[in-house]
Image (cartoon, rainbow, N blue to C red):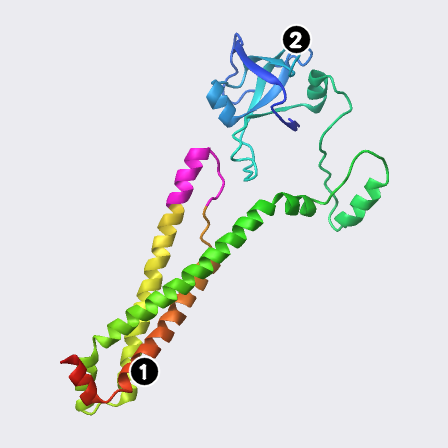
């Protein structure tokens, strides 16, 4: 059934079910001359306890007369982040039925035009805009760009928070690794006393820092995956939608783990170098 998408511009009230309900898998018999076929959003149908075949009463805003309709279908709307906070209910009519109901024939707010593959959207918009007055035609990319301004601002804000978090975690990691290596002063002094070279000691400390960095990055990835799953489960249930609120992509995980390992190696190397360049006797005296 080809429906024209429309917001709930018509007032709808449950008038009661029809005498007989269609069996599962069967479509209800609809008299198009007497009843208006209406498609109801799933969330609206659950709230109003409507099922396919139910009879409903429909009227336009401010109208004194009503039309009888029938629930011809219950559909799941495409997830749209720009309308999720509005919590509106939606229905769909045939375009001719909606125009007659609103008493506004030959009038629409928005029309979608699908172009053939290879057609330049900007060129098609320019040609169609010259054919008549009173409307503007825009490529879908322009509309998406204009409607995504809020999400672009939020994305930039998240990037700023991520940069500050990385900077703060780097400083914290540096302090932690310095303290960790400083605790090894006695061990390093003993290794130097028995003839182990600075290079070998440095490599041993660096290997330990590498293991810690890898273990920490893997643990962080697991925690992020669990947190992302919990966020999606919770907010999908709250807003009754299939939108993805938190997405942990492979690129994000690889970037985070790579950055973690690089920072861990760098900080570990700096801490180890501070320790091995000190004379063994001085290290032992500090440890004691």
How would you rate the neighbour count of disc 1 (Cα within 10 Å): few for under 14, some for 14-19, many for 20 or more? some
Does residue 251 appear to the left or right of 122 in the view shown?
left
How would you rate the neighbour count of disc 2 (Cα within 10 Å): few for under 14, some for 14-19, many for 20 or more? few
Task: Specify the principal SS of the magenta part.
Answer: helix
Task: Give the distance between the C-alpha atoms of the residues marked 2 and 1, in whole angstroms.
Answer: 86 Å
Q: Quadrant of residue 200?
A: bottom left
Q: Is residue 204 above or below residue 83?
A: below
- Residue farthest bottom in this picture: 195
Q: Is residue 120 above or below residue 258?
A: above
Q: Which residues are magenta?
A: 230-245
Give 71 or 15, whichever is nearer the viewer: 15
The residue under the point 41% across, 59% down is 165
Whether residue 243 appears in magenta in the rendering, the answer is yes
Q: Which residue is mark 2?
A: 64
x and y, in percent, of residue 273 in the image = 32, 82
Quadrant the C terminus occupies:
bottom left
Mark 2 and 1 residues: CB-CB less than 8 Å, in contact? Answer: no
Q: Which residue is mark 1?
A: 273
Give 154 or 42, whichever is nearer the viewer: 154
Whether residue 48 appears in magenta in the rendering, the answer is no
The residue under the point 65% across, 12% down is 31
Does residue 210 appear to the left or right of 16 in the view shown?
left
x and y, in percent, of residue 149 in the image = 60, 47
Q: Secondary structure at mark 1?
A: helix
């Amino acid at each position: 059934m080809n429906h024209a998408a429309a917001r709930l511009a018509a007032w709808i009230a449950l008038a009661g079910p029809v005498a007989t309900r269609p069996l599962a898998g069967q479509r209800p018999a609809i008299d198009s001359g007497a009843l208006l076929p209406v498609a109801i959003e799933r969330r609206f149908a659950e709230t109003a306890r409507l099922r396919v075949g139910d009879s409903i009463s429909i009227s336009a805003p401010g109208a004194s007369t009503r039309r009888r309709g029938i629930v011809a279908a219950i559909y799941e709307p495409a997830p749209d982040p720009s309308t999720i906070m509005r919590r509106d209910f939606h229905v769909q009519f045939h375009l001719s039925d909606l125009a007659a109901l609103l008493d506004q024939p030959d009038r629409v707010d928005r029309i979608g035009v699908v172009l053939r593959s290879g057609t330049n959207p900007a060129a098609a918009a320019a040609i169609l805009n010259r054919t008549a007055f009173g409307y503007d035609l825009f490529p879908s990319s322009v509309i998406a760009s204009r409607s995504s301004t809020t999400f672009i601002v939020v994305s930039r804000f998240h990037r700023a928070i991520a940069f500050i978090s990385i900077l703060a975690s780097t400083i914290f990691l540096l302090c932690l690794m310095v303290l960790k290596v400083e605790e090894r002063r006695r061990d390093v002094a003993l290794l130097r006393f028995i003839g182990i070279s600075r290079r070998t000691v440095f490599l041993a400390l660096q290997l330990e820092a590498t293991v810690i960095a890898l273990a920490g990055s893997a643990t962080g990835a697991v925690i992020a995956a669990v947190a992302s799953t919990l966020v999606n489960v919770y907010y999908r249930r709250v807003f009754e939608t299939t939108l993805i609120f938190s997405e942990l992509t492979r690129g994000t995980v690889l970037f985070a783990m790579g950055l973690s390992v690089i920072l861990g190696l760098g900080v570990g190397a700096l801490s180890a170098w501070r320790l091995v360049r000190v004379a063994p006797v001085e290290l032992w005296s500090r440890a004691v």
